[in-house]
Amino acid sequence: MTHTRLSLALEAGMELPSQGVIAVFGPRADTDLSDLPKDRLVLVTGFKPDVDAFTARGYACQTDAPTAAAAIVILPRAKALARAMIARAAGADVLIVDGQKTDGIESVLKELKKRERIAGTISKAHGKLFWLNPTSDFSDWQGRAATVQGFVTRPGVFSADGIDPASALLIQHLPQKLSGRVADLGAGWGYLAATVLAGHPAIKELHLVEADSAALDCARENVTDPRACFHWADATRWTAPARMDAVIMNPPFHVGRAAEPDLGRAFIATAAKSLAPNGQLWLVANRQLPYEAALAALFTHVEEIGGDKRFKILHAQRPTRQRG
Ligand SMILES: C[S@@+](CC[C@H](N)C(=O)[O-])C[C@H]1O[C@@H](n2cnc3c(N)ncnc32)[C@H](O)[C@@H]1O
């Protein structure tokens, strides 16, 4: 949400209730909330890096929707998630929706106009903010869990429509001898973890590290093997409970819309520091992502062991820097 759109809306006569909780759904760490009374805000987010950033700045954060006098939805890109957030926020007296054109704010406004009277709209900075006093039933927008290819997913989680092809490719390249303690960094709804546990009886523990609480909730349903340990954590700051024998991962490489290879490199650094001296890392990445130099800096031996036109599978052995 831009500071400008919110302040323009307040100047244009949008009124926030004088009392009660103001819930903000889906703020990102860089969302400017300075026009809002901090002591009345409850930030509703399940993305751990954002939760950590806001908590450190003194904001109250939770994953469940509170009872609120006003609710502000920061529109996400995924349409099903946007609808689900609006449905969760619609119990408030005042509902404010803010988003960029590239995230689909125009089509959400159009859909909402079919069910509600829109009280006001501000267009600014390639986006829109509008507000309304919700009266209609949004239960059809709630966004329930779905079962896809035998796995539970929820709106907005990574690869909610099915198994990610890069992860499926990684599975084909993992050795049969995988054993001991294994970590899956950025475990999503659990496809890699569930498949690896099913095929590798010598694994003693598998640590699923995931930042998105909705994805991790799905993983808890999808990975019922007692060897699984679930960590709601920022993988770039995660400390393994013990040295891992192997790390597997399909790391994220986007922050918002921009490609951000530094995020993948930070995952590689966590893998290196989590591994035992003879530990091994298997990762899949889009072919154009430049991870080789980061791997070479942190591991004794690195090689590409397979792939196709879109993805490459990288295998790194024996971390050179043991930190923490
Ligand atoms: C490319 S997906 C891979 C998901 C899963 N391993 C699979 O194969 O379906 C990357 C995952 O990393 C998660 N993620 C993004 N940033 C993260 C962070 N800082 N710490 C932990 N997980 C993160 C995303 O929510 C997403 O589930």
Image: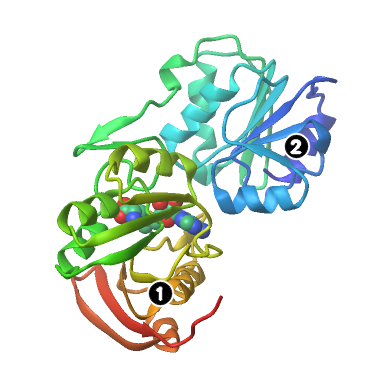
Of the numbered discs 1 and 2, the one sitting upstream in the chain is: 2
**What's under tag 1, amino acid-wise?**
Leu
Where is residue 237 shown, x and y percent of the image? 56, 64
Residue 234 or 140: which is nearer the viewer? 234
Q: Nearer the viewer, residue 306 or 267?
A: 267
Q: Quadrant of residue 132?
A: top right
Which sits in the foreground, 75 or 199?
199
**Dividing the image into 4 quarters, which one contains the C terminus?**
bottom right
- Residue 316 visible in the current orientation: yes
Crowding around mark 2 (Cα neighbors within 10 Å: few <14, some 14 to 19, many 20+) is: many
Q: Quadrant of the N terminus?
A: top right
Q: Residue at x 41, y 43 (%)?
A: 215
Report if residue 249 is visible in the image. Answer: no
> In which of the image's four quarters is ligand 1 placed?
bottom left
As drawn, 261 above or below 74: below
The residue carrying pointer 1 sits among few (fewer than 14), some (14 to 19) or many (20 or more) residues within 10 Å by Cα, namely: many
- Residue under numbered circle 1: 275
At a point 29% along the width and 53% down the height, the residue shown is 193
- Name the disc covering residue 6, or none: 2
Element under disc 1: strand
Q: Is residue 141 above or below residue 107?
A: above
Q: In screen coordinates, is 305 left or right of 78? A: left
The amino acid beneath tag 2 is Leu
Looking at the rendered image, the disc whose residue lies closer to the viewer, 1 or 2, is 1
At 32% from the left edge and 36% from the top edge, which residue is drawn?
Answer: 221
CA gap between label 1 and label 2 equals: 46 Å
Residue name at image x 44 percent, y 22 percent: 141
Residue sitting nearer the eye, 62 or 82: 62
| Residue 233 pos. (x, y %) | 52, 54
Q: Position of residue 228 (x, y in %)?
A: 33, 50
- Circle number at residue 28: none
Which element is circle 2 on? helix
